Every structure is written in structure tokens, then in C-alpha cells.
Image (cartoon, rainbow, N blue to C red):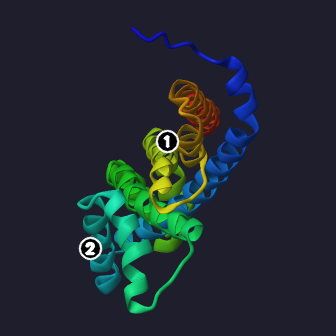
Amino acid sequence: MIGISFDWHYLWGATPLLLTGLRLTIVLAVVCICASIAIGYLGATVLFFEVPVLRRAVRGYIALIRNTPLLVQMFFFYFGLPEIGIRVDALWSGIIVLSIWGGAYQIENLRGAIDALPPRLLEAARALGLHPMRTFVFVVLPVATRTVVPSMMNTAVSTTKNSALLTAIGVPELTYVAMDNIANSARGLENFFALFVGYLAIVVGMSFAASLLEARLGRGLAR
């Protein structure tokens, strides 16, 4: 039997490269999460006001993204579109595809939260004579946002973890760096350990931030 030992010295030496990948993973997560949330609010607005043509486009977009694998979407965007003359580098391809993927789920998160609002809320706004847009911006969205934080957080975590798939198109994020290290050193145990720790640290930090945000948004309801 071949003994396998954990080489802390190797891991320490590989840490600078792994931290470089971790930094890019964090940047990707922040950019894609913010972009997907923006897409979510925009799409939810279109669905709320039932804009005829745009509503169908949003529904089609959601169906397309949710019913196809994310990896296939990445391959289509990065390897397929150049066939028709559309070329985007790997990093921006990853950001665009991951943001679009997360946006489809954020739209559904917000749509569900808005549909779950009590009818009396809208009735009260109408009774006060509020314009529909003002009702949506100042009444519907703030209340829906309070309840949708956990769902949006789940999608944000999934977006962060799915950034590991960008290694398939050559984006040098954390997983790509770890796999490159394994190919060069054949030290899989240490690099996979670093992956676990890296992603766990990011997700735990995000969960903590989301808990603070949820508590802050819920202060008014607790009174």
C-alpha cells in the first residue's frame, strides 16, 4: 500500500497562486451577482406590468436558461458564437453567461415574492391614489425585497459556486489554478483541500452578510 501524506510545505508554497485564483473568483462572484440581481429586478418589473412583447421575451429567456445546462450555455457563447463572427474573450464570456444564468433565477425569485404579497397592500395603494409605478417602486418592491432575501441568497451562492465551471473555457479562477497545480505537481489532495476551504470561506462570508441584511430589512416588521 502506498502511503499518502498531506504536504503542508507544498500547500504553503502554492498559496500565492491559489490566492490569485481566489481573488478572481471573488471578483467574478461580486460582478455576476450584482448583474444578475439587476436583471432580476428589471425582468420582475416587466412581468409585473405585463408589457406585451417584453413579457413574452422575458418568459422565453427564463425558460431557455432554466432548461439548459449552464456548461452548455458557456460552450455555446464562447465556442459557438465565434462561428458567426461574435468573439468575446474568456473572462467576459464567463461574466456574461453567469450573469444571464443567475438573472433568470433572480427574476423568478422576485416574481414569486411579488405574487405572494397580500392583495390588501395594492388595494391600500390604489385607495391612496398612488400611480402604478410609484406603487411598484415604493410599496411592492421594498416589501417583496424583505421576503426574497433568502431566495436571492441561494441563487447568489449557486452563482458563486458555478463560477468553478469557468475553468472549462480557460478563466484562471480558483478551480482553474488548483487544477493547473495538480497537472504540474500531481499533488491533488492539497489543492482539493484548498478548493474546499476557499469556496467554503466565500460562501460562509456571503451567508453572514445576507443574515445581517435580512435582519436589517426586518427591523421595521419586528416593531
Q: Is residue 40 visible?
A: no
User: Which residue is rendered at x = 60% and y = 54% of the image?
Assistant: 172
Q: Quadrant of residue 199?
A: top right
Disc 2 residue crowd, few under 14, some 14–19, many 20+, Cα 10 Å: few
Q: Quadrant of residue 187?
A: top right
36 shown above or below 129? above
Circle 1 SS class? helix
**Where residue 206 appears, x then y in whole percent?**
60, 37
Which residue is pictured at 38% across the width and 62% down the height? Answer: 104
Q: Is residue 75 above or below residue 108?
A: below
Q: Quadrant of the N terminus?
A: top left
Task: Identify the element where label 2 is drawn.
Answer: helix
Mark sitting on residue 60: 2
Question: x and y percent of residue 125 in the render?
Answer: 46, 61
User: Residue 213, image x and y in percent?
Assistant: 62, 38
Could you say which disc has been placed on residue 131 in the image?
A: none
Residue type at tag 1: Val
Q: Residue furthest bottom?
A: 85
Residue 66, by quadrant, is: bottom left
* Spatial CA span between label 1 and label 2: 24 Å
Q: Quadrant of the C terminus?
A: top right
Q: 143 or 1: which is nearer to us?
A: 1
Please name which of the two marks, 1 or 2, marks the residue nearer to the observer. Answer: 1
Query: Residue tagged by mark 1?
Result: 157
User: 47 or 155: which is nearer to us?
Assistant: 155
Instruction: Count numbered badges in the picture.
Output: 2
Circles 1 and 2 in contact, beta carbons < 8 Å: no
Horizontal arrangement in the rendering, residue 70 relative to residue 29 (left or right): left
**Given the image, on which type of amino acid does mark 2 rest?**
Gly
